[in-house]
Structure formats: C-alpha cells, structure tokens
Image (cartoon, grey):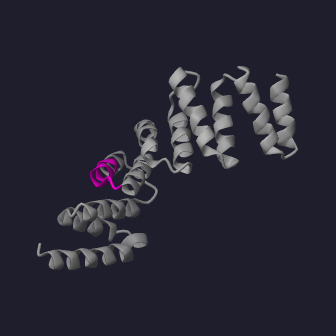
Amino acid sequence: AYWAQMAAIYSAMDNMPKSLAVQQLAKTEGFVTEDRDLTRIAQMFMVEGLPHRGAAVMKQGLEDGAIEPTKSAYQTYSDTLLQSREWALAVEPLAKAAELEENGSLYVRLAQVNLQLGNWGDARDSLNKAFEKGDLNDEGQAWILFGIAAANDKKWDAAMRAFDRAGNFEGTREVAGKWKGYIQREKARLGG
C-alpha cells in the first residue's frame, strides 16, 4: 500500500518518471501483481516514451496469467508493440483484440499493420472480417485500404471493385478516383 501511495503522490505532483520508477520497483519486488496495476504500468511506459518496456510487462502478464486475456489487454499489448515499431509482433495480439471487439474497427487497424508489413492477402482478409463485423467509423477508408492491398497484389479487378465502393463515400471519392486512374494506367502498361 505504501508503494502505491508513494507512486500516487509523485503522480499528483506531475512527476510521472518517479511515479513510474516507484511502480516498477514495486513490481520487481513482487508487490504489484494485479491485472489493472500491471496494465497501468504498461500504459505509463508508453506515455513516457518507453513502449518496449510496456510491451514486456504486457507479454509477461498475459503469459503468466497475471493479466486477464481481454480485448483491452490485447489492445494495450498491441499498442505498446506498435509504438515500439514492432509491426510483426503486434499482429497476433491485435488479431486477438479484433476477434473480441464487437465492431470491425480493430480489424481495419490490423489491416493497416499488414499493409505496413507488405502482407497484402492478410490485409484483405482482415478487411473482409471488418466488413463482416461492420459498424466501421470510416467504411470508405476501409475500402481504400482493401483496394491498395489488392493493387499491390496486382489483383486489378478486386482493387477496382474496392475503389468503386470507396467512391460511394464523400470522404474517399476523390482518392478512389485517383486510384482507379492509376490502376487503369498500370493495366495498360503491363498489358493486362
């Protein structure tokens, strides 16, 4: 309890590095074992620019059962990995979070990570799951991503269909048109 109080005092004084140091020391000594406390430490590491340390806390907690495998926990874990630019490592926890999410928004995020990695087919699979779950914040942008993944895979017809769908949304109409022009030029250039 004293460790928590000391961390809270430093936090109230707006001294997050000392608050985090106290919490990390308390964790190392075995005094911090609760799911919410471990997750808070991981989030604080992210805020303080040390996401790789937060990722280590989340990984260990999820592996040893100290952190319950919830959507929120997997999302925090993937966030720490993404902030650490560990794109490939973020795929698995993000996929687990997306599976547990009610809407398709995290599948769109997973598709973005797969695009970053050049995994075009995986990106399209993630977006198909996003469309299946529905309730997307920006469906037009999701169709743009699908089209980009298909275009990079030279699946021109699928890309054109995706950009046609994206063209139905005011916010993505112009971008979709530009991509359609690009695909037409590429098809003509490659003779197909």
Percent coordinates x, y for residue 84 in the rendering: 55, 48
From the viewer's side, name the closer residue of 82 and 158. Answer: 82
Quarter assignment of residue 147: bottom left
Q: Mostly what secondary structure, the magenta segment?
A: helix
Quadrant where the image shows the N terminus: top right
Residue 41, given in percent of the width and then of the height, sits at 68, 35
In the depicted structure, whether residue 184 falls above or below residue 87 = below
Left or right of 36, for residue 16: right
Q: Position of residue 76 (x, y in %)?
A: 56, 40
129 with respect to 20 (left or right): left
Which residues make up the magenta segment?
Answer: 118-126
Residue 121 sits inside the magenta stretch: yes
Residue at 54% x, 25% y is 68
Give the image location of residue 23, x and y in percent.
75, 32
Q: Pick the quarter of the image with the C terminus.
A: bottom left
Residue 97 among those drawn in magenta: no
